Amino acid sequence: MLIIVNMTPASLSGETRQDSEPNIAVDPGNPATIVATAFTPDPLGGSNAPVYVSSDGGLSWQLRTIVPSGGPTTADISLSFASSGGTLYAGILNRPNFHFLVLRAPDPVGSTSPMTILVDRANEDQPWVSAATVPGGAGGGDDRVYIGHNDFNASPRTASVELSTDARTAGQPAGFGTHGVERRGTAGQDGPPTRTAVHPDGTVYACFQRWVTNEGSGPGFSDHTMDVVITRDDNWGLGGNPFSALVGDDGQAGVRLATGRFIRFTASTGPLGQERIGADLAIAVDPTNSSRVFVAWADRVGGKAGTDWTIHVQRSADRGATWSGDLLTLTNGKNPALAINSEGTVGMLFQLLEPDGTGGTRWVTHLHLTRTDWALAPTDRVLHTAPSGIPSRIFLPYLGDYVRLLSVGTNFYGVFCGSNQPDQGNFPNGVTYQRNANFGTGQLLANDNITPVTVSIDPFFFFRQEPDPLPWAPSLL
């Protein structure tokens, strides 16, 4: 079963914003409770930004203005529930000063109270939140939270993880502190993304892009070479020197699984049309086997003279020590997101700029599901496809610098952004709209269900049910 839902509530049917760059958190203790985000402002223009909340597993959504941002929207924002207890954690860049805030909410769906501010610090970028609850033994029941971020206060080694090993109930700052995971020299800083993945046995991975050289800049772009580096901690980050369990061939903490890769940051035009490129990265660990971990990133295979932006996926079966080489490459793609379910099935969500057969291009959002780590062709579900030039960009990022994919048990949950044109041809696997729309005429409609509304960018939720396969049955993908 595959369900896709346009998340814009019916009460906002008249909106025409660029609601891009989505994120999502699913409560593992109650998967019907889901919270999601995008660059969506408070419709009333207040000082708290909204999140999307669902209490029915994503079938319906409404806004809760609970994010203390100083303005009606945030810049970057990501979310995670811990494994149990129902507490939601968020990392944001607020408005208008772009401070990094760490936030906590014990009941984000049932309460309208603003989230509690645990950390407030300047000079940060792109927080990415992962959380888990210790299942038993020492620290049993504690919420442990890991927020990858780019900490310019630590320049030039900016890749960092903000972590707390007991975050649920303590007062500000609830045990949070920042820890550098970059141990080598850089060309002034690391790349924007630092991504984390947590296993219930206490293994925590952090992956980042080390900027090795600065190749200079030109109109609308900057060029760098980078290494993809993975670090690991084997005890929840509890020690005095966390994320030092993996040692590279130079004796420094962190294994470089890809080196000397060329990246071009674009700020106006590039190989992906209206969208910028430069900082795609994702990581996932198998919930049944902490030794099995996957990383995806993008770079320009053609180097400075090339025109591609290529996604790569690699796997380690020995806790990040050695890597498989490319299991998959995808040209002109961005926003890879990885998750692994309780049966070991790997899911990857991504967006490709694909030819439409008439000289134009379309943004196509795919979900890959594989039980052979791409040794055999994966199940490929097209979630959304739409012309890449409609609507026109209002700001960057256009679709967003990331999407997110999660697993709970055997099932997958995710979010992406794209054109909200109500055309059944754009949704090969179907869709449900909350906002008013006429699929017969391809027209969005305002709250009166009569007045036409211009096409814009909306967030979409999806749910993929993966039944437990019988031992004698073939793959049910």
Image (cartoon, grey):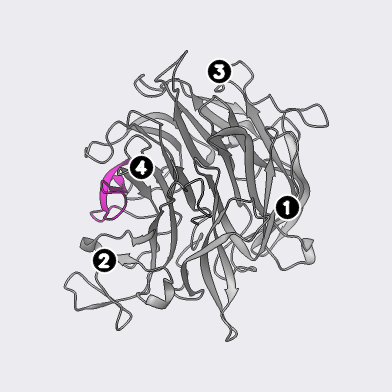
Going from N to C along the chain, the mark reached first, 2 or 1, is 1
User: Circles 1 and 3: CB distance less than 8 Å?
Assistant: no
Please say if 292 is above or below 223.
above
Going from N to C along the chain, the mark reached first, 1 or 4, is 4
What label does residue 326 carry, if any? 1
The residue under label 4 is 69
Do we see residue 162 in this rendering?
Answer: yes
Alpha carbon distance from label 4 to label 2: 26 Å
Residue 361 image position (x, y, % from top left)? 56, 77
Crowding near the residue tagged with mark 4, few <14, some 14–19, many ≥20 C-alpha atoms within 10 Å = many
Crowding near the residue tagged with mark 3, few <14, some 14–19, many ≥20 C-alpha atoms within 10 Å = some
Crowding near the residue tagged with mark 2, few <14, some 14–19, many ≥20 C-alpha atoms within 10 Å = many
The residue under label 2 is 435
Helix or strand or loop: what does disc 4 sit on?
loop
Image depth: mark 1 or mark 3 in front: 1
Near-viewer residue (120 or 358): 358
Near-viewer residue (171 or 152): 171
Helix or strand or loop: what does disc 3 sit on?
loop
The residue under label 3 is 238
Going from N to C along the chain, the mark reached first, 3 or 2, is 3
Magenta segment range? 42-68
Image depth: mark 4 or mark 3 in front: 3
Amino acid beneath label 3: Leu
Hey, which quadrant is residue 380 in on the image? bottom right
Going from N to C along the chain, the mark reached first, 4 or 2, is 4
